[in-house]
Amino acid sequence: MSVFTVSLNNAHQGQLDIDPRTQAINPSAVDTRGTQMATSIQRTIYVAGPNRTYRKLFDGQVFTDCNYWKRFAYPQVPLDQAFITVTTDDGSVYSDTATENTYPLVQTFTLAGGSTYATAGNSIDFVGTYGSNASFVQMTNEDSTSVKVRINGNANAIFDLAGVTTQVFNTGDLTISKLEFQNNASGATTVNVQLIAALLSTCNS
């Protein structure tokens, strides 16, 4: 999910809200009506969201959603038409064709010898972190020591990822919401596991 800021007070769109606190005491002597407000609670708009719902946005609002909203931000549109600022971009794509809304995630896990599923850094929660299940997963054990992998937090879904091997779950094989790794076999040494996953962009509106 990306983070966006509503910028209805874009200076390139004209000064419509004047801050009365900066109003000249003697307008005849100082030709000014005050400076433009940074944000204005008087400015709100309704914008059609990706799921055919209308979202009410107010100036200065910060919200988290899919990259559908980048289409209202500069440079996707000219600056004088933009009313969204991208604060944090998660790098995902958004297409009006739902099947095209997948994006890659690549991550390497460094599993210390003796570490368990509960060890910090030994797991990835696709749903909790990215808002969707992984439709494709490839795991490569780059070292010679076998490690255990638990799927979706299920104690009955644990398998051994042998040393220097690759395990692939293709689209349609299994929906994966979470992966956890354990490297606590006797004499275990540090193991690196590279993960490649395909995630689906999901939208809050």
Image: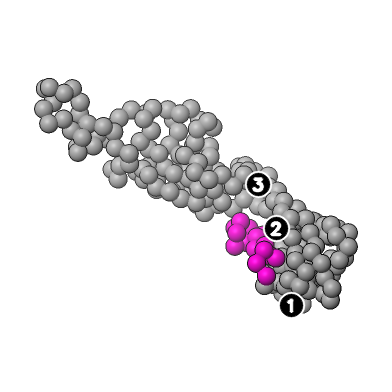
Q: Nearer the viewer, residue 28 or 135?
A: 28
Magenta region includes residue 128: yes
Residue 166 left/right relative to 47: right
Q: Nearer the viewer, mark 1 or mark 2?
A: 1
- Numbered label attached to residue 155: 1
Residue 164 is situated, as x and y percent measured from the top left of the image, at: 88, 59
Residue 36 left/right relative to 140: left
Q: What residue type is labelled 3?
A: Asn
Q: Nearer the viewer, mark 1 or mark 3?
A: 1
Q: Is mark 1 on a helix, strand or loop?
A: loop
Q: Which amino acid does label 1 sit on?
A: Ala
Residue wearing tag 2: 134
Residue wearing tag 3: 101
Whether 33 is drawn above or below 134: the answer is above
- The magenta-colored residue range is 119-134
The structure residue drawn at horizontal position 65% and vertical position 47%, both measured from the top left corner, is 101
